Amino acid sequence: MQVEQIYTGCLAHAAYYLENNGEAAIFDPLREVQPYIDRAIASNAKIKYVFLTHFHADFVSGHLDLAKKTGAQIVYGPTAKPAYEIISAEDNQIFKVGDYSVKVIHTPGHTMESTTYMLIDENQKEYGLITGDTLFIGDVGRPDLAQHVIADLTEEKLARHLYKSLTNKILPLSDDLIVYPNHGAGSACGKNMSKETTDTLGNQKKVNYALQPMSEDEFVKQILTGLTAPPQYFPQNVLMNIKGYESLDTVMSKGQSPLSPLAFELLANEHNALVLDTRDAEVFARGFIPNSINIGLNGSFAPWIGEMIPDIKQEILLVTDPGHEEETMIRLSRIGYDGTIGYLEGGFEAWKSAGKEFDVVNRISEDDFEQKFSEQLLIDVRKKSEFDSEHIIGAINVPLNQINQNLSQFPKDKPFVIHCAGGYRSMIAASILKQRGWDNFVDVNTGFVGLAKTKLAKSEFVCPTTML
């Protein structure tokens, strides 16, 4: 059977391309749809359907643009009622893609409209399951996201729906079916996902904790234990996927405006725009436009954009490595940040060459910390779970995603040191502190990875919380 997984690592997202006998279908496409169109053209196939497993929270789907550009019909499972024309499929309804069949299996739990699509080949053999966020490799979809959009859909109600969906509709299916989930490790849509992106259903029945024999109450307890707060942008993405949104072509045309340093500066002041610098942390530290925020493309870009920029409609001016402007705009729009109004032509070097003021962040190595800075206050901006697992004795923990609510933890009357795991998150924190007026700190460029190698660490300077 010809089914292809199209995986995007920075979002831990999988879309799927199904094709047979000149017809194609796309499942859960990303915002930029041209790659799917090009794939179909390469095989001389027409995209007939765009199947959605649910209203996504972690990205804005490309179904509207794809339908408009290809004439494909948009298909959701039962109960989905978006503000645009769709086929609201019935449970067990069959759709034909060439000689293949796609069977709708309504599996509420992650959300109420969540649907699994069974793939059936030309010989009527059941081949695989496109499970969306119902079933992952090693995990199942978290049931606490819908309540951020519809308060009555509590996490417990959805967890009970999920138990019934898995027990009554997924577990009875054949072991040789291939499971094709919407996400892999790194996604915030689950808590225990494998780095593998496909598996057989039979193996998942053996190894997936959520598919083991247990009562409904036991399942609910297991599923709800250990959930962390979802990124702030998730509810806003859900609403965009329900209500609709601007075409990506329109968004890109507004944002692809090269600006001279003077024009960039004037626009930033006139629009109160956020200056977002997406260069690597080490490069940013050596020179950046004052008041800009650093969230590097070569890291967990989308999740940290969503965490650190609360207003999804915020107007944004970009500073990127030259040639990465379009990529940055696309990656912002994937999660609904459509407010780019221009970029600095020539990047930071153009700003510097124009004689404009710039700022720096003082970064130190783990050896510098050990020899010169170990007596200063140390602030660890990793997640609480990372800090609780292991940290430097005497450090305090202010997780990056809580920094704006805890600025009082950062002194202004004495020097201090910040670090994360490897230098990416601490530079985000450093840029925020600089923007808010702090200048009395240094950042450990190798983070905890480097600090754990020092003599201080080897002298039990590192300890699990359980030993404190």
Image (cartoon, rainbow, N blue to C red):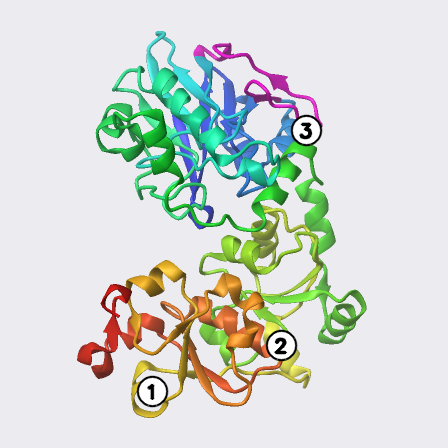
Farthest residue in the left direction? Answer: 459
CB contact under 8 Å: marks 2 and 3:
no
**Where is residue 313 drawn, in percent x and y?**
70, 52
Callout 3, which amino acid?
A: Lys
Callout 2, which amino acid?
A: Arg
Left or right of residue 280, residue 306 in this image: right
Rendered view: 132 above or below 433: above
* Comes first in the chain, label 2 or label 1: 1
Provide the secondary structure element on which disc 3 rests.
Answer: helix
Residue positioned 54% across, 56% down in the render: 307
* Comes first in the chain, label 2 or label 3: 3
Residue positioned 25% across, 64% down in the render: 466
Q: What stretch is highlighted in magenta?
A: 73-100
Nearer to us: label 1 or label 3: 1
Left or right of residue 90, residue 159 in this image: left
Whether residue 439 can be seen here? yes
**Where is residue 365 drawn, in percent x and y?**
35, 82
Mark 3 neighbour class, 10 Å CA radius: few under 14, some 14 to 19, many 20 or more = few
Distance from disc 1 to disc 3, alpha carbons, whole Å, reads 59 Å
Quadrant location, the N terminus: top left
Q: Is residue 189 magenta?
A: no
Rendered view: 107 above or below 400: above
Please, what is the dominant secondary structure of the magenta stretch? Answer: loop
| Res 374 label | 1
Q: Is residue 84 magenta?
A: yes
Q: Which residue occupies the foreground of this view, 258 or 199? A: 199
Q: Which residue occupies the foreground of this view, 350 or 62? A: 62
Left or right of residue 76, residue 227 in this image: left
Q: Name the residue under label 2.
A: 436
Distance from disc 2 to disc 1, alpha carbons, whole Å, reads 25 Å
Callout 1, which amino acid?
A: Ser
Mark 2 neighbour class, 10 Å CA radius: few under 14, some 14 to 19, many 20 or more = few
